[in-house]
Image (tube, rainbow, N blue to C red):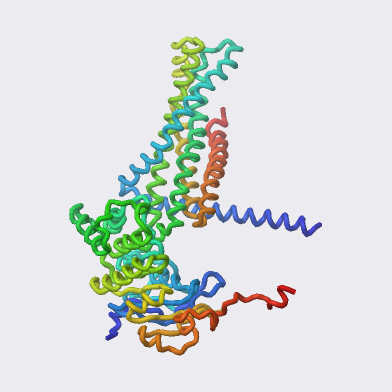
Amino acid sequence: MINAALNQVARLGASSLVFVEALGRLAVLFARLVLRLPAVLRRPGLIGSQIHFLGNHSLAIILVSGLFVGLVLGLQGYYTLRRYGSEEALGLLVALSLLRELGPVVAALLFAGRAGTSLTAEIGLMKAGEQLSALEAMAVDPITRILGPRFVGGLAAMPLLAALFSAVGVMGGWFVAVVLIGVDAGAFWSQMSSGVEFWDDLMNGVIKSIVFGLIVTLVALYMGYECRPTPDGVARATTLTVVAGSLAVLGFDFVLTALMFGSL
Amino acid sequence: MESSPRDLLVQFEGMGFAYGSRAIIDDLTLEVQRGEVLAIMGGSGVGKTTLLKLIAGLIAPQQGGVRVFGEPLSPDNKKELFATRRRMGLLFQFGALFTDLSCFENVAFPLREHARLPESMLRDIVLLKLECVGLRGAAHLMPSEISGGMARRVALARAIALDPELLLYDEPFAGLDPISLGVTARLIRRLNDSLGASSIIVTHDVAESFEIADRVAVLAPSPAGARLVALGTPQSLSDSQDPYVRQFLEGREDGPVAFHYPASSVEEAFA
């Protein structure tokens, strides 16, 4: 009985150790990526193709999701605001929700599912096919040549995707409010433009999206680079990218929100 | 063959290697001379591939040392290690081609990374290397569109793209049909002689390697890690009376390597 309980404790300890070790390896990979940044930036062509690959392939899902989130925000916001007779504030509500929160967060979650998984699977399969070892044997550093451009590409693509998400979302909110419900268009836009602050709202959202882009891309690369080079291992790593990446985004979102808007 | 120190491309000096607590190679002393084709043979899992990784500096030995091109390998000095690796070509068991690049781009890859060449010269070199392996016509194909034997030849063209002085082959004959097998074997010999390089082949294919190798080294498993049990010309090995060598060359079922994996006695297990 006591033994069983102790075993549980031991197992808990063991899994915490595994987790802490993984965090350490993640930090080491991050440090190595940062150290090789100058060498990576010397090959803008490789980075460009990664921005194109990661950004372009996520574009459709980001735009469609942004539009629907905006539509729903318009409907739900109208329901609440009408009680207080302030339907004109709908534009402000939609814009603030998207810029501060939903744009960066939802775009990052979608980015993890769409681009993160493909990064993990690609790197994992390269490892399984000995392509990373082949690079090493050819005196080419896989971190500089393969991981680096993807890291910078993800970092650059994420804020752009979040911005597009928010922009399309605002259009969705406008469509519901102005076209469907009949809220005054002038009030909708003027409330928005006077209520949204450049630094407090817009730039904080941009900072969030940069941080999330870093987290998702780093986690995806780490999972691929450290996975067991078997079909089973790559499958597990791909799943973990979505799970760990999404949880990390949500956790960091809370911390960042508390830091940015906590004093309000 | 004359052997002044500068003609020794690879030297293992009393080298031992272990993965964690599992001993792989025990006290190996072996030299590879310029111009020769050396076949390293032994059963599966005896640590042959590990030897290649040690030469390429992908892993480091715990005891003794490895000298490549007369210089000791220093795994901590990445710059020096990469400079050494640029002078060798490593062929992986299944080719390890980059699946997102065409055959042409695969062969061009090391040239693009390490040499600043005008595009026209690069094209000539790549096509020349592909011609060496008989696959100039397949330059535009993707790795998924060619057979396993062809993929290995493209990988070979990639390995010789920078005219290496030392060529390392990991199981170049595994899983090939008889025609590809003969083609690959003669290709290895011909490339070695035309490049003036040394080649180390890790394999367990007796007939092909005896045909093309100058010397053959046989590794046998032991509890302390694999040991070198025989080294010599194919002829001298054929005459060897060492029981492990005999069992290996003749493919006998029982000998120093038992047919049965160690287990409890049959009577006990089926009682």
Image coords of residue A243 (percent x, y):
56, 43
Q: Is residue B80 visible?
A: no
Front position in the image: B65 or A72: A72
Q: Nearer the viewer, residue A68 or A147?
A: A68
What quarter of the picture does the C terminus of chain A occupy? top right
Q: Residue at x 49, y 36 (%)?
A: A110
Apparent side of residue A190 relative to residue B70 in the rendered image (left or right):
right
Choose between B176 and B27: the one closer to the eye: B176
Rendering coords of residue B73 (x, y %) = 38, 72
Residue at x 50%, y 15% (from the top left corner) = A177
Q: Tell me what residue is drawn at x 50 percent, y 80 percent.
A: B252
Give the total of numbered labels: 0
Residue furthest out toward the right: A1
Q: Position of residue B28 (x, y in %)?
A: 44, 81
Answer yes or no: is residue A248 visible: yes
Question: In the figure, is residue A175 to the left or right of B158?
Answer: right
Position of B39 relative to A243 (above/below): below
The image quarter in which residue B107 lies: bottom left
| Viewer-closest of B192 and B81 | B192
User: Relative to A216, does residue B74 appear above or below in the rendering?
Assistant: below
- Quarter of the image that includes the N terminus of chain A: bottom right
Residue B172 horizontal/vertical position (percent): 38, 68
